[in-house]
Image: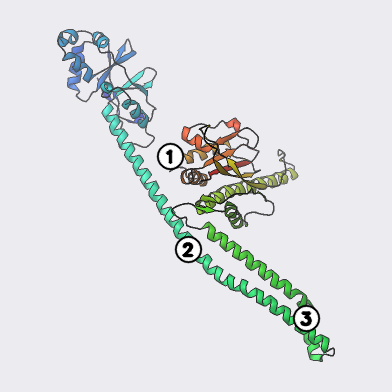
Amino acid sequence: MPFLSEGSYQDLRLESILRELPLYDFQVELSCRGVALAEIFEKYPLLPGAILVDQGQFVGMISRQRLLEYLLRPHGIELFLNEPLSVLHSYARTEVLVLPDTLPVVAAARQALRRSPELLGEPIVVKKEPLAYQLLNVHELNIAYWQIRGIETQVRFEHIQAQMIQIEKMASLGRLVDGVAHEILDPVGFIWGNLTYVTSYSQELLELLSAYEKHLPTMPVEISELKEEIEFDFLQQDLPRAISSIKTGAGRLKTLVTSLQNFCHIDEVYPKPADLHACIDSVLLLLKSRLSGEIEVVKNYGHLPPVPCYAGQLSQVFMNILSNAIDALINQSLNQKFAIEFRGAGLTIPPNPTQKPRIEITTQVCCLGSPDPNAPESRGISIRIADNGPGISPQKQRTILESFSTEKRAEKETSLGVSYRIITAKHGGKFYLHSPAGRGQTDLSQNVSAGNRINEEDWATDAGTEFEIVLPLI
């Protein structure tokens, strides 16, 4: 007798497979007569068809629609009703879609829709085990497919809504920080502007006192005691240095606040030319507290023209990449220190090469090439940010790629995923990850679009990491 599995539409997820849907388990031997199968179809009106077996071996499937179609033909009842199903199967032999029960519902529905028009209503054979086959009504598959698409749409809507809320929060925070920075710049401007006069006034006062000493060699005892009390000789030497130190501090504060304003800059609707070197320097200045004396930053800046871009978003990309590089270098330094302490305690720890942590930033104008050999080559800007840290493991490489894909974006949102979308979607650029060991490079954009897998042998876990951003010059 036909048996219906306990599949349900209530617990469907984006990753649901065919095994979770209601499946019909009904097999008949080829020796069974057509009238017996017709009686079963009449008794179970929801049964879409029957699995045909010959001595327990799967040979095909006959659907309710196909059986009725042949019985309604001229002389169909005389030809097929009282004959074994093997006769009907030889006449009604059609292509049967057999799918594994582990196949996702979305992929199965797409395969079912690719069939020829006359087969779109035919049931689908679901293969559970090497000798176990069940039937899936194509209409139930379509219902499950559209329910999953609805769930996917809801998830995307919620993700987009969360992104919009986050963008609005960041925009509000940017406006707040910009206002605070502006308020800080006002008193800094007062200090900076008055320091020039204070320097001039102090020098003039010291010159006046020197003139008094020159023309009045004999000073009263009260003045002499006062000079000794205030240490006039030291004050005369230290006052210019103190004013110079205040001027340096005010200058650094002014530069820091300006960098903070540039980083929190709200981009316009259209890209505007910007100095990328200034953007990178502003980010480095904001990260200066994390750049300890052990981390060396090497700048190999080329001659770059102003690049049309969204400066605020590019600053976010530089911040994400540099923050990851600093984290990797700090972790590596801590591991080296722990290894040295453990070796000092007599424990056996593999030796770790001591090298100064370094971040190298290289910028230059490059040729992008053109698919048309007759067309002139277009130019672009290359920005390389490399570190000599421990590198990125293959497992983390896969996590990064998944965060770039549309399907996994909502589950695995990463700072590099945000950077990837800013570079590719907003600026039409390329995002590369290089293997400094000389084993090639990976274009993250092509890997995401083509769904390529990373070969774990192509990644060096001890040769550092280098990201390259390529932006077109319009």
Q: CA distance from mark 3 to mark 2?
A: 47 Å
> Pointer 3: residues within 10 angstroms few (<14), some, or many (20+)?
few
Q: Which residue is mark 1?
A: 406
Instruction: Note whether 416 is above or below 200 in the view shown.
Output: above
Which quadrant holds residue 252? Answer: bottom right
Inspect the image, locate mark 1, and give the three-letter code of the amino acid beneath it: Thr
Q: Which mark is residue 176?
A: 2
Q: Tell whether 70 sits left or right of 123.
A: left
In the rendered image of this protein, does residue 211 appear above or below residue 398? Answer: below
Q: Amino acid at mark 2?
A: Leu
Tell which circle, 3 or 2, labels the residue nearer the N-terminal end.
2
Quadrant in the picture for the N terminus: top left
Earlier in the chain: of badge 3 and badge 1, it is 3
Q: Is residue 404 left or right of residue 257?
A: left
Mark 2 vs mark 1, CA separation in Å: 32 Å
Which residue is labeled 3 in the image? Answer: 232
- Tell me if residue 48 comes above or below residue 272 in the rendering: above
Q: Is residue 11 visible?
A: no
State the image coordinates of residue 25 (x, y, percent, origin top left): 29, 22
Which residue occupies the extreme right position in the image? Answer: 217
Q: Position of residue 398 (x, y in %)?
A: 52, 36
**Is the Cβ of the residue at disc 3 closer than 8 Å to that at disc 2?**
no
Image coordinates of residue 432 in percent, x first then y, are 56, 39
Circle 1: element type: loop
Residue at image position (58%, 50%) is 305
SS for callout 2: helix
Asked where in the image residue 119 lies, by quadrant, the reply is top left
The one of 379 and 264 positioned closer to us in this rendering:
379
